[in-house]
Image (cartoon, rainbow, N blue to C red):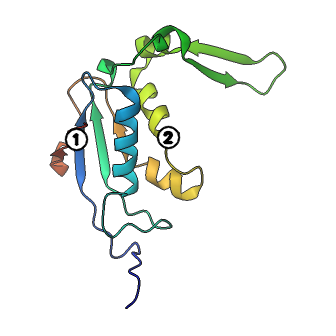
Amino acid sequence: MTTYMANKNTVTRKWYLVDATGKTLGRLATQVADLLRGKGKPTFTPHVDCGDYVIVINAEKIHVTGKKMQDKMYYNHSQYPGGLRAVNLKTVLEKTPEKVVERAVKGMIPHNKLGADIYRKLFVYVGEDYDQKAQKPEPFEVK
C-alpha cells in the first residue's frame, strides 16, 4: 500500500463564503487558515497547495475579547532610526477593518513561498458585497 501524495494536477478547489459578523477574531482566523491550507481534506499534503478559496465578508463586525481593542498593537518599522509606528486595534478597525482579518490569517499560514500562494486565495471585504459571485461560493459557518 502506498501513501497518497496530492499534486497540483489532482487538487480540486471549492469556494467558501464566511460571514464574520459577531465572530471572535482568533477563532475565525484559525478556521479560515485551515480552509485555505486544505487541512480538513483527506487528500491534504503538506508541501502542496491543496486548499480552497475563502471569501470573508463583514470584516468590520468582528468581535474581540478582553481589552484587546485598546491593548493589541500593530507594529510597523520603516527601517530608519526612530521609524517604529504602533497603532492599536481600534484605530485599524476604524480605518481598514479588512487588514485586521488579513493579518490574523496571514500569521497562521506558513511563511514561505507556499504560504504566499495560499494567502492569495483569501478575499476579505467590508460589508455584504463581494466580487466573486460568479464562483457561487458555499456558505461556511465558523463555530
Is 7 left or right of 11, judged from the image as shown?
right
- Residue behind mark 2: 106
Residue drawn where x is 39% and y is 75% of the image: 6
Is 83 left or right of 32, judged from the image as shown?
right
Q: Position of residue 109 (x, y in %)?
A: 50, 48
Check the picture and name the quadrant holding the C terminus: top left
Residue drawn where x is 45% and y is 26% of the image: 100
Check the picture and name the quadrant holding the N terminus: bottom left
Secondary structure found at label 2 = helix
Depth order, front residue of 27/9? 27
Q: Position of residue 93 (x, y in %)?
A: 42, 15
Q: Amino acid at mark 1?
A: Leu
Residue drawn where x is 55% and y is 11% of the image: 71
Residue at the far right: name it: 81
Mark closer to the chain start, 2 or 1? 1
* Pointers 2 and 1 in contact (C-beta within 8 Å): no
Q: Counting other residues with Cα less than 10 Å from the Cα at mark 2, is it few (<14), some (14-19), or many (20 or more)?
A: some
Q: Counting other residues with Cα less than 10 Å from the Cα at mark 1, is it few (<14), some (14-19), or many (20 or more)?
A: many
- Residue behind mark 1: 17
Q: Position of residue 21 (x, y in %)?
A: 24, 23
Depth order, front residue of 133/29? 29
Q: Which mark is residue 99?
A: none
Secondary structure found at label 1 = strand
Q: Please say if 81 is above or below 90.
A: below
The CA span between labels 2 and 1 is 18 Å
Residue drawn where x is 35% and y is 39% of the image: 123
